[in-house]
Amino acid sequence: MKIIISEFFDLFSNILKTSVGIFLYLILPVTGISIIVSAIQYLYFKIKSDHKKFNFKKYFLRNFKFIIPIYIGIFCIYLTLKNVPFSDLSKYFYKINYSWVLLGVVFGALSHISRSYRWKYLISPMGYKLGFINSILSVFSAYLINYTIPRAGDLARATMVSKYEDIPLDKTIGTIVAERVVDVICILLLISFALVVEFDKISTKLTSLFQETNFSKILIYIVFLTSTLIIIYFIIRRLNIKNLLSNFFSGIYEGIIVIFKMDKSVWFILHSFFIWIMYLLMFWATSMAFIELHDVPSYQLIIAFTLAALSIMFSNGGIGIYPLSVGISLSWYGIELTTGLAFGWVSWLSQTMLVVIFGGISLIILPFINKSKT
């Protein structure tokens, strides 16, 4: 009995340390910054004698949502530089083969062009015509806007095309939702691939864990897991997450139905595959710039890419977290952390430069080529 209690407290202690770490390093700083920003906004409203309309809770939540991805990105950069000195990372920038990096940028550009062209297959069935120039300029603009406010680029893209192509906003937003459904499916396929490839390693790890773990520890894990599931169940009931999940999956289902009902669904699907193949080739080409990564098997690069792609949603354009995800995932396979991080930063920076340059140009010239509609 004493052993069970001791092991329970060890497990509880580890969970508590993790929770305290998340609170101290993430929740507390972001909350503090959000309160300060909200207070400054309140003072601004007060100066304008309009402070009675100021809703502190509303502005605080808005600021919190805006600040947290920026903070995560900065914190990931801090973690990177804490573990690997900048001087060690910068050495790679002098010795890599930039021809491969440039090829990766070309693959990235092709994926964006294909995404722009694919959009017309969703617009056409509704009786509207989408100009390719406006489509590609709005896509690049959207990618750039995502670096400032996460996921705001999609709304901006829908608004631009609605304005310059005379297409109702609800229609353009609907097509982007369908696009995102395809992206989610592609990500799920990559995750499935990663799980299948790593199945032996995962099953071996679980088997050894149960073999090395005594009955009392297994019992504690079962009790803890059951308790966690019960807590999650009540949270889902409380926050009405059941309806949110239902809407999410019904949205995916409706998106799939729309795609297969369109006249040129085959071309849409082919473009979708092409886009993600270009993403993978972009990642592979950039890895070839590093001599240390020439012998890395393709499946390991795919797994690293999948984790990096998932990480993008947590910070503005993946800043900080994308390179860190690449470095950590490759280190699982024996690649030196410094090499993996350098590769992650080169990959992220090359694609970011592409988006910043062409996104900036797109934002500038869009109003000029649509002067009559501005």
Image (cartoon, rainbow, N blue to C red):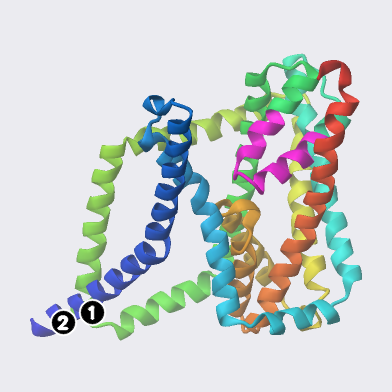
Q: Which mark is residue 10?
A: 1
Q: Whole-Å distance between the Cαs marked 2 and 1?
A: 6 Å
Q: Which mark is residue 251?
A: none
SS under mark 2: helix
Residue placed under numbered mark 2 in the picture: 6
Residue 58 highlighted magenta (yes or no): no
At 26% across and 62% down in the image, what residue appears? 225
* Above or below: residue 26 compared with residue 8: above
Q: Position of residue 184 (x, y in %)?
A: 59, 45
* Image quadrant containing the N terminus: bottom left
Q: Are marks 2 and 1 in contact (CB under 8 Å)?
A: yes
At 37% across and 59% down in the image, what residue appears? 28
Q: Nearer the viewer, residue 121 or 235?
A: 235
Q: Nearer the viewer, residue 242 or 40?
A: 40
* Above or below: residue 41 compared with residue 332: above
Give the left or right position of residue 317, taking residue 98 as reference: left
Residue span colored magenta: 137-158
At 37% across and 36% down in the image, what residue appears? 56
Q: Position of residue 346 (x, y in %)?
A: 76, 68
Q: Position of residue 104 (x, y in %)?
A: 83, 61
At 79% across and 28% down in the image, what residue appears? 120
Label 1 is placed on what type of residue? Answer: Asp
Q: Position of residue 309 (x, y in %)?
A: 63, 56
Magenta-colored segment: predominant secondary structure? helix
Label 2 is placed on what type of residue? Answer: Ser
Q: Nearer the viewer, residue 331 or 362?
A: 362
* Above or below: residue 146 compared with residue 293: above
